[in-house]
Image (tube, grey):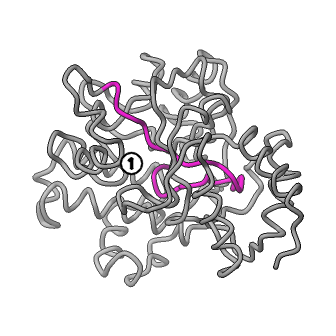
Amino acid sequence: MSNIPWNTFEVAVTKLLSNAMVALHFHPDRPIAGMNSVAQALLEQGIYKNQFETHISNGSVSAYSGGARDLWEKQMFGGAYQLDGVTNSQRPKYGALDVMLHPDGPAPRFGSCYFILSPKVSHRCTYTYLDSHQDPKEKGTYGEFDDILAALFKDAFFRNDAIGENNLTPRKLIEHLLYNLEKPFKDPSKREPNRNLNHYIEAQVHDDIMLNDDVEVLVADPSFQGTFIGDVLEQICLKYSIALYWHMGFAMRVEEVPPDFRGPTMPSLAKRIARNDYIDASVVGVAVNDLKRNPAMWSDRGGYEEVLQELKYMWHILVRFGSPFSRE
């Protein structure tokens, strides 16, 4: 019905499987056990760790034996990661397949910065169409990718919308796969964000992710430029030969924060954490670190987990509604 010849489809799929890279979103300034921040741990250790090791998450904080993440991994991978002798370091790492090449990444809800991995890593991943915690029926590997493709083209055909891309038809998707994935990486700093919070092809990366061998690009939030965390990000790229780019960023005035997107408490939280009446990724990170150090000072808003969830929601608001970051 879309008048796409079968051989054209096959060539497009080959281009996808040869060139699409996995992106790993993260917040570089988040505190982790035994280290000051995620960025410092990456610089010192040179390895990207999973949530069972870091005990932090930008999604479900349930990476422990018997927790929700442990249970859905058990179901998804047939208990492979619950076998005797399997260590936490062997657990999968979570990212998203960067098909549409959005400047803010394929799944920005999970972090203000993202690594783009080498195409070779894509072949040792498993995939789900949308988030794995929802137990979607469409699962696959690069050897068995048809269910993922079927869901992608079905959304493009029936909804004209797929994995965060509006006005996407099967023909437009085919042309994108044929011509865009092979192009050199485009500087994201002047490009409009896509703001895709919920729709992505999740990638579960198996085996270690070594910065010096598996990471090609770091795309960072400009609110960290000129800060200690920004300096650490630059050191990471120098040490491990990673190309560094800054995207356009997200910033909002306090009065712009809506009460009806992530709940009525968001405007008051924005007032509390704002710097010069603005919020951005680094401002949210400062609040998360203060919550970690001084949880009692935040008790008026609830328990530690409740406030942490509020701060995660604030980042979602920035992604959805924020304007480009500016130091002026």
Q: Which residue is label 1 attached to?
A: 285
Q: Is residue 241 visible?
A: yes
The structure residue drawn at horizontal position 42% and vertical position 53%, both measured from the top left corner, is: 283
Queried whether the magenta region covers residue 104, the answer comes back as yes
Placement of 160 over or under 215, stated as above or below: below
Placement of 245 over or under 103, stated as above or below: above
Where does the image place residue 31, in percent across and percent down from the top left? 31, 37
Instruction: Say left or right for 70 vs 234.
Output: left
> Badge 1, how many Cα within 10 Å: few under 14, some, many 20+?
many
Quarter of image, res 78: top left
The structure residue drawn at horizontal position 45% and vertical position 78%, both measured from the top left corner, is: 255
Q: Mark 1 belongs to which amino acid?
A: Gly
Nearer to me, 256 or 172 = 172
Where does the image place residue 302, in percent across and percent down from the top left? 13, 65
Nearer to me, 94 or 253 = 94
The structure residue drawn at horizontal position 54% and vertical position 32%, both measured from the top left corner, is: 124
The structure residue drawn at horizontal position 35% and vertical position 57%, both measured from the top left corner, is: 133
Where does the image place residue 38, in percent across and percent down from the top left? 40, 32
Placement of 185 over or under 103, stated as above or below: above
> What's the magenta region?
89-111
